[in-house]
Image (cartoon, rainbow, N blue to C red):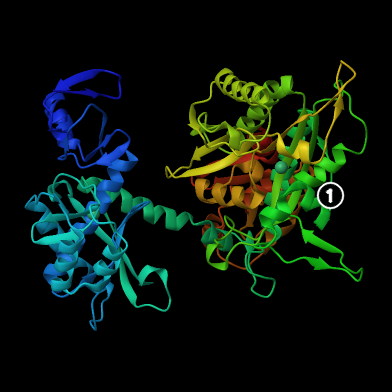
Amino acid sequence: MINITLPDGSVRQYDNGITAMQIALSISEGLARNVLAAEVDGQVWDASRPIEKDSSVKLLTWNDTQGKSTFWHSSAHLMAEALEALYPGTKFGIGPAIETGFYYDVDFGDREFSSDEFKAIEDKMIELAKTKEEFIRKPVSKADAIAYFTEKGDEYKLDLIKDLPDGAITFYTQGNFTDLCRGPHIPNTGFVKAVKLMSVAGAYWRGDESRKQLTRIYGVTFPKASELTEYLHLLEEAKKRDHRKLGKELELFAFSEKVGMGLPLWLPKGAALRERLVNFLQKAQARAGYEQVVTPHIGHKNLYVTSGHYEKYGADSFQPIKTPQEGEEFFLKPMNCPHHCEIYKTKPRSYKDLPVRLAEFGTVYRYEQSGELHGLTRVRGFTQDDAHLFCRPDQVKEEFMKVIDLVLYVFKALGFDDYIAQVSLRDPENKAKYIGSDENWALAEAAIQEAAAEKGLKTVVELGEAAFYGPKLDFMVKDALGRKWQLGTIQVDYNLPERFELEYTGSDNMKHRPVMIHRAPFGSLERFVAVLIEHCAGNFPLWLSPEQFIILPISEKYEDYAKKLSDELKDSDICGLIDFRDEKIGRKIRDAEVKKIPYMLIVGEKEAEENKVSVRKHGQGDLGSMSIEEFKKQIITEITV
Ligand SMILES: [Zn+2]
Ligand SMILES: [Zn+2]
């Protein structure tokens, strides 16, 4: 008999050689139907593989990341089986699971392949899945493995086997298809109920441009047909909300190759939106005791040598800016922190002065590979809503609580209500690789966790995920489509105070090092605006809308009345515009809807006579007619956050 420890800590006894599937069956049949694989002593295994010693076992289903990736990797085998059946002689490279779905790199020889053939492959996959072929694992010797793929004539598998040690090679077979693979796999192909091939691309064998280009086929599969439908719907919705598309349609930002890739140009409406975000946070920060500072876009090489950024960003980053002065070099700043350390040092600080909170909307530059650039989410120049808090070790918890308040205030005002906090701590097994005293680390780690608990945050703790210079708390936000984004971050730093020799005089009259906390509720304005656009599909909260109203005169006759209204609203800090075009009112309404302008004010004869406006709200329709005073009151209540 062997002892199996389950995740809830309970221990059960089973015959030696029991499989995870049999364990699942002994618990409940319903569970067994959903088991895709198992984690045995921390390793992912086939649910059908015999367990031969005392072990900790976690059953994996579709709800586990590793369950899903086992499902998708097995689907890559299923697709390969279908391809081999449909196109005999196809050779296979590698077929891993990816974040959503899987791909397989294949060599069709001289055959042209296009996505027109997807349907036939999908049908074949479903046909094979219905026969519930088992995935059978078989250890093989290196010689046998080579013999098998030599016979089959698959040079890619032979190339892979070359690097594998004898004794560690396994084959997996389902139906008529055998693959070189270390596994694990789902019990049988019958778990796959829905298939969609997504796209086809070229991929060099082993990523080497001097080698053959294979055909990469991407696909995704699900254990329920309804999940595929939902997934495709979500993709469609994500496409509609793509911030690159909406950014163009709503005239928020643009890119120009002449200016440079990855360097966003904020158009007037985008700049107005950005300005509002900045004002909003600046006001909140002023209330929370932050002081605004301004620092230059470049810094002397010595600054970054001191901070360590030169070593980190130096070679791969932008090149130095030379001056007529022999040997003098400047760099575009990759971070604001070093500049802020120098500001801290401009005068002596006492324990009574702390915390010092220095804030800056600081623009930084980092060289991202051109292939990595993506709309506003991956750019080469961006503005962080940065601040650095310099405090005493005993103030870390209180400062964290205050920053959490600020981040939650931001989320609430912008409609993000689904988030968790990820707390990243030291790897307790490997304390030597972190800078800073044991005592300070223990203090800060406890402080962060207590602060998160007292603020009632939903938290996950990740051991070993802390930076070498300090623990941190990141906010992971779910958007309206359920996609996860990392937004605000709060990070303790023991490194920079050391490197810059920052000090304060303690109550003991001795010199001490302050703790530095980096924090950015938005992260960067660029990335935040991108996430916000996709979250609200371009329908910004009213207070943030670059244009809050548009006045639509029914004809030229009512333009004066429209102008009078517009001036009155602008006097109350409500901004918008008038549609002076010589168009039918229906057309004007439609165009305003496309631009997602929150309020449309229609004025014609009746309105002008009664000194009123007919109000339409975007996405809601007609709100009826009201006096301009009533409208102002409504809009001001809505804008106040
Ligand atoms: Zn495999
Ligand atoms: Zn920083």
- List x then y, in percent, for residue 258: 68, 75
Q: Residue at x 48, y 34 (%)?
A: 418
Residue shown at 61%/21% (left/top)?
A: 451
Labels in figure, total: 1
Left/right placement of residue 52 relative to residue 8 reads left
- Residue 282 at least partly seen: no
Q: Quadrant of the C terminus?
A: top right
Residue nearer the viewer, 459 or 89? 89
Residue at the image point whose x is 8% and y is 49% from the top = 132
Q: Position of residue 326 (x, y in %)?
A: 90, 69
Give the left or right position of residue 473, taking residue 78 as reference: right
The residue lying furthest to the bottom in this view is 110
**Mark 1 Cα within 10 Å, few/some/many (few <14, many 20+)?**
some
> Who is closer to the viewer here, 636 or 125?
125
Answer left or right for 218 relative to 568. left
Residue 97: x %, y % from top left: 31, 54
Q: Is residue 247 left or right of residue 100?
A: right
Q: Quadrant of residue 497?
A: top right
Q: Is residue 227 above or below residue 374?
A: above
Which image quadrant for residue 442? top right
Residue extending farthest left? 131
Which residue is most to the top?
A: 508
Q: Which residue is mark 1?
A: 295
Ligand 1 positioned in quadrant: bottom left
Q: Secondary structure at mark 1?
A: loop
> Which quadrant, please, contains the N terminus?
top left
Residue 611, picture quadrant: top right
Residue shown at the point (23%, 81%) measured from the top left:
111
Amino acid type, label 1: Thr
Identify which residue, 641 or 296, lies in the foreground: 296
Q: Is mark 1 within 8 Å of ligand 2?
A: no
